[in-house]
Amino acid sequence: MENQLEQQQPQAAYDDKQIQVLEGLEAVRKRPGMYIGTTSAGGLHHLVYEIVDNSIDEVMNGGCDTIEVTLYPDNSVSVKDNGRGIPAGYNEKTGKPTLEVIYTKLHAGGKFGGGGYKMAGGLHGVGASVTNALSAWLEVENHRDGHIYTERFERGNVVRPFAMTGETDLHGVTVHFKPDPDIFEETVFEYEVLLKRMREQAFLNAGVKIILNDRRTDEVRQDVLHYEGGIVSFVEHLNANKHCECLHPQVIYMKGEYNGSIAEVAMQYNDSYNEMILSFANNMATVEGGTHETGFKSALTKVLNDYARKTGVIKGDDKNLSGEDVREGLCAIISVKLEDAQFESQTKAKLGNSDIRTLVDNIVSQKLEEYLEENPAVGKIILDKALTASRAREAARRARELTRRKNVLEGSTLPGKLADCQEKRSELTELYLVEGDSAGGSAKDGRDSRFQAILPLRGKVLNVEKSRLDKVYSNQQLIPIIQALGCGIGEEFDLSKLRYGKIIIMADADVDGSHIRILLLTFFFRHMKKLIEEGHIYLAQPPLYKVHKGKTVRYAFNDAERDRYIAELGGNAEAERYKGLGEMDPEQLWETTMDPAYRTLLKVEIGDAIACDEIFSVLMGDQVEPRREFIEKNAKYATNLDI
Ligand code: 1YM
């Protein structure tokens, strides 16, 4: 990236290295998106990660065990570590202080030839200079070899030169900076976002202590993140937050090394029906997986099948357990550290190094087999879980076969209640899932039938969080939805067959409506996640009030809007509260909720896969107490509770 950039820049007429350095940071300020993704909240937090990453590198190199991150009232933030401190010398080529080079030169030396585990590619590792370029000011205080060295920058430029400013018994680096409000749309850090990232880093680097302080209000908040158990603690944390039962008390942990690369795996089964595998390469989440994940999955399936045959649980011609069978209820973390990480895919979130697949496969094949030999009771529990999953999958397959023979789940039959649209190109079509027959009737009459299809839903949808696949596939409320969408489900899901580009859930703005929304979202999240990931699922926003005076009518979507319209139309104006969609006539429903020119749709997105998994488990799962706690904690966010 650095080379490309330098080529794109006009050739400097003067051969002054200082100028070139400044031009480098100018490029960052001109196109910040290229370096940190966005200039909204995501990019803002990224500035902190870049600095913390340097401290984490020092942890990995064995020089540092404590990192402290502090937020201040002026929206500045400091990161302090107790590592070796930055070398205090001068750069041979430029004659500039090493510290200054790190903070002013893009990509200074690809992790400075230090032999660390810095990543090549992706947003990660673009480094401290990017944070400096995008900060209104940044100060470094470096404790090394008994001396304190400081330097200050503003918008990437040196304003107080590098100098020795004192003596010290300590060692380590403190960086204090304030993101530039001219660059960022959002300048207020979100504590929870930083906390999540710092916790993740603490899990991934066993033993490091990360302290997070919030000094922005009188009530100082502090979290100390310190896990001697590393990724074992990570798995315990994830399973505890899911509020399900673990099937065996101990997390299984495996680690191995080859050719300078290290791989670690921690895993534990719970009684849910979902799998949760999180993978990391050099402490960065690889949300699209990659070779480390593939190696893990294939070894797991192989080891458990071998073990099942060896113990006689599977015999002779019996079918093998599938990958999905052995991963039902599995929570696992895979973390690899390697020198030259290669990333695939657009988002650089998929690891490509093929030797890592072999490494992880070997470790899991060997260590898991040993573990099962030594812990036959746990082995039995895991096989029981996988066998039950396998039987359920078999039952689901039969249910699907049966319904398929009647052409039920295939696109060829459409549900009787569906009022389809004329348009066939799915980019242009919309399917409204409407709560209740009467609202369904209004929607049918009010819609633009050229591109809008309506499927009324009667009664409560199945809670799939508590149901196995066979029940899902034979459920009378879900079958029409699966049929209408046309893209199949489970192993046969095929996004290219989707019949509607937008799937819009339209339910009342009351408790029952919320329940239907969450049940449908649970179904899509657990069984057709791609639809959410690819942005096909929407929530309709029906108005809460009709404000009218004479023939003038306004629709209000919240109380403030209602009051504004009443004031605008004059004191006699009347406001009527809609009790439900069914109360609106077809024209009103079209005007307020379905007409693309005026309606508001909320697109459903998975911001945070772990948080989503937890929320669905807590809200829809077996245990009542965590649900009560969640609702109490979040009730304040519910704006229109109808009791
Ligand atoms: C709050 C941010 O940057 N800590 C930090 C940075 C470095 C070192 C230690 C370090 C690295 C090496 C040797 C090495 C850096 N040094 C360099 C460079 N904290 C923070 N702590 N000695 C110390 O990688 O070989 C770059 S970063 F280039 F000078 F070595």
Image (cartoon, rainbow, N blue to C red):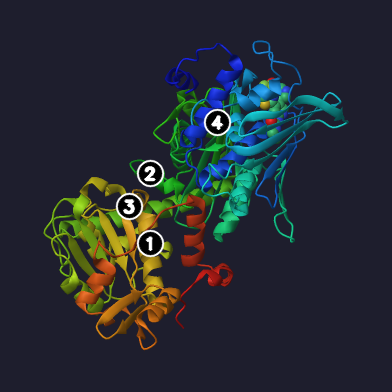
Horizontal arrangement in the rendering, residue 443 relative to residue 638 (left or right):
left
Does mark 2's beta carbon lie closer than 8 Å to ligand 1?
no
Instruction: State which tag comes first along the sequence, 2 or 1.
Output: 2
The residue labelled by disc 4 is 363
Query: What residue would you read off at disc 3?
Result: 531
C-alpha gap between disc 3 and disc 2: 24 Å
Give 203 or 108, whichever is nearer the viewer: 108
CB-based contact (under 8 Å), mark 2 and mark 1? no
Counting residues from the N terminus, which is met first, the one under dot 3 or under dot 2? Answer: 2
Residue under circle 2?
322
Q: Amino acid at mark 4?
A: Ile
Q: Farthest residue in the bottom direction?
A: 572
Distance between mark 3 and mark 1 Cα atoms:
11 Å
Disc number at residue 288? none
Q: Nearer the viewer, mark 1 or mark 4?
A: 1
Q: Position of residue 282 (x, y in %)?
A: 57, 32
Of circles 2 and 1, the one toward us is 1
Looking at the image, is 123 positioned above or below residue 406? above
The residue singled out by tag 1 in the image is 521
